[in-house]
Amino acid sequence: MRLGSLPRARLANLPTPIQEMPNLSKKLGGPRIWVKRDDLTGLAFGGNKARKLEYLMGDAVAKKADVIVTGAGFHSNWCTQTAAAARKLGLDIVLVKNGPRDGWEPAEWDGNHLLHELMGAEIKVVRPEKFKAALDAEMDAQREAGRNPYFIPVGGSVPLGAAGYVNAMLETFNQSSEMGVDFDYVVHGTGSGGTQAGLVMGARALNSGTKVVGAAVGWTSK
Ligand SMILES: Cc1ncc(COP(=O)(O)O)c(C=O)c1O
C-alpha cells in the first residue's frame, strides 16, 4: 500500500523542526545530538499522537463515522489529543477512562481530565479490569443508538496509526538531506509500540542505514 493513498486528516503542524543540542552533546562528551521537535505538532499541546491521528481520523472520516470511541488512563495525553482531533473534525467523542471505581469523579477537575471535559468529551470511568469490556459495550451502545462509531485502541497503535511515524521518518530523511547531516540513530520513547513500528518501517523503506532505538516510557511488574 502507498502511504499517499491513505486518507489523511491534516491535524498536525508539519514538518516539525530538527534542532541541534550543542550543550547536551558537549555535556555528554560524545555524539552530536539533535532533537526532532514532535512536541510542536500542535493539537492540544502537541506530542506523538498527532501524527497517528492524522491517518486514524482520516480513516474515520472516510468511513463517515460520527463518534469516536477510545480510552486510556484518567489523565491520558492520548485521550486529550484524540478529543481535540475529533472536535476539530466535528465528531463526537466518548472516552472510557480507568479510575478507582466505576463512575468515579474527582473532587476537583484539573489536568487532562479538565481538558477532556472542556472539549466536550463524553466520559465513562471504570475500574481497569472492566476497561476492555466497557469499550466494547460503548461501541455496541453507539450502534444501537443509530450512530456510526469508530473505535481507536489505546495509543492508536494499529498499522494506520503507525503510518504517521513512517511519514515522520520520511520527513526526517528529507530534512537530514537538506541539512547535510546523516543521522546514525533515531532514539525515541516507546510505549504501546506504534511509534516504533512506524519509524522502523520508514527506516527500512528508505534503506538509509539509520538505526531506530526505543526507550520504554513504561514498565510491567513481570
Ligand atoms: C512522549 C511519549 N513518547 C512516546 C510514547 C510512546 O508511543 P507509543 O505508544 O506509540 O509507543 C509515549 C507514550 O506514552 C509518550 O508519552
Image (tube, grey):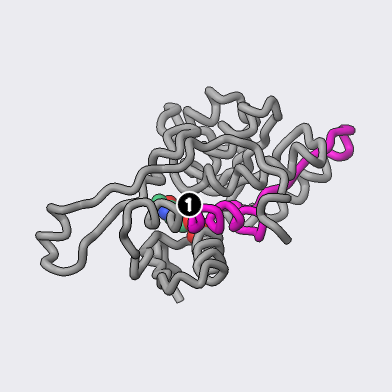
In the structure shown, which secondary structural element does the residue marked by tag 1 occupy? helix
Q: Quadrant of the N terminus?
A: bottom right
Tell me where residue 38 appears, x and y as whole percent: 41, 46
Q: Residue at x 45, y 27 (%)?
A: 109
From the Cβ of disc 1, is ligand 1 less than 8 Å away?
no
Q: Is residue 28 above or below residue 63?
A: below
At label 1, which amino acid type do we have?
Glu
Instruction: Say how many tags the image has.
Output: 1
> Where is residue 48 drawn, in percent x and y?
47, 48
- Rendered image quadrant of residue 122: top right
Across and down, in percent, residue 89 comes to 66, 28
The stretch of residues the image draws in magenta is 142-170
Question: Looking at this rendering, what residue extends furthest in the bottom direction?
Answer: 222
Main SS, magenta region, reads: helix
In the displayed structure, does residue 110 sit left or right of residue 25? right
**In the image: residue 115, left or right of residue 62:** left
Between residues 185 and 50, which one lies in front from this camera angle?
185
Q: Nearer the viewer, residue 24 or 115?
A: 24
**Where residue 56 sits: x, y (%)?**
67, 46
Which residue does the numbered mark 1 point to in the structure image? 171
Q: Residue at x 40, y 65 (%)?
A: 216
For label 1, count other residues whose C-alpha is less than 10 Å away and answer few (under 14), some (14-19) or many (20+): some
